[in-house]
């Protein structure tokens, strides 16, 4: 009997990039300022501190519509800032999404890195969210999160590049 190697399933994650025509310090501020988070990420409330061991908590209104696997969207995303720099970006560990209904999803990591935007004066922003346990809720979460991050980054660009 021949034993076949285990098949690794790809682990879903978010990995998005955008180039913004502003300094990285302004991008960092947009990820931590409550008014900016409300403007581009539609956050109802937030408590975020850009320093080691600071909180990163963002809350959205619960949607009326329900996803078949996740229930209502919205809720709270919470984690702990491990590193934050206006030049390099920030890293949030121990990230959990607490949906309005149902069990939390996590732990995950959120990495937002900054680099020069090539020939353009500005900042290349890369958002990576990862961490995974096999299951249909996790897979569906990343499908929804990937679309939400793309929309959010587009809104961030509209906010920072009027």
Image (cartoon, rainbow, N blue to C red):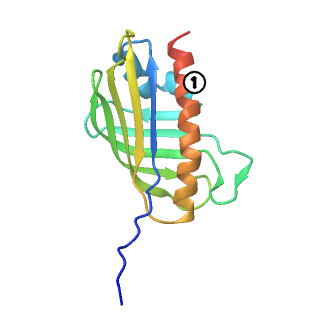
Does any portion of residue 16 appear in the rendered image?
yes
- Residue at the spot of label 1: 155
Asked whether 49 or 11 is in front, the reply is: 11
**76 to 17, vertically: above or below:** below
Q: Please name the residue shown 34% across and 30% down the image.
A: 113
User: What is the quadrant of residue 27 in the picture?
Assistant: top left
Q: Position of residue 121 (x, y in %)?
A: 37, 9
Q: Please name the residue shown 52% across and 23% down the image.
A: 156
Q: Position of residue 157 (x, y in %)?
A: 52, 19
Q: Please name the residue shown 42% across and 58% down the image.
A: 132
Determine crowd level at label 1: few under 14, some 14-19, many 20+ residues with C-alpha closer than 10 A: some
User: What is the quadrant of residue 8 in the picture?
Assistant: bottom left
Q: Secondary structure at mark 1?
A: helix
Q: Is residue 6 left or right of residue 83?
A: right
Q: Position of residue 151 (x, y in %)?
A: 59, 31
Q: Quadrant of the N terminus?
A: bottom left
Give the residue furthest to the front.
2
Does any portion of residue 43 appear in the rendered image?
no
Q: Quadrant of the C terminus?
A: top right
């Amino acid at each position: 009997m021949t034993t076949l190697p285990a098949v690794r399933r790809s682990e879903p994650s978010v990995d998005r990039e955008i180039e913004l025509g502003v300094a990285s310090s302004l991008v960092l501020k947009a990820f931590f300022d409550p008014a900016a988070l409300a403007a581009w990420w539609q956050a109802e409330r937030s408590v975020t501190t850009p320093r080691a061991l600071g909180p990163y908590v963002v809350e959205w209104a619960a949607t009326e519509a329900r996803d078949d696997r996740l229930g209502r969207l919205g809720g709270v995303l919470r984690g702990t800032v491990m590193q934050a720099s206006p030049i390099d970006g920030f890293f949030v560990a121990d990230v959990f999404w607490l949906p309005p209904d149902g069990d939390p999803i996590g732990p995950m990591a959120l990495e937002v890195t900054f680099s020069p935007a090539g020939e353009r004066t500005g900042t290349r922003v890369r958002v990576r969210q990862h961490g995974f346990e096999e299951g249909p809720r996790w897979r569906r979460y990343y499908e929804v999160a990937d679309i939400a991050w793309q929309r959010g980054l587009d809104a961030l660009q509209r906010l920072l590049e009027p």
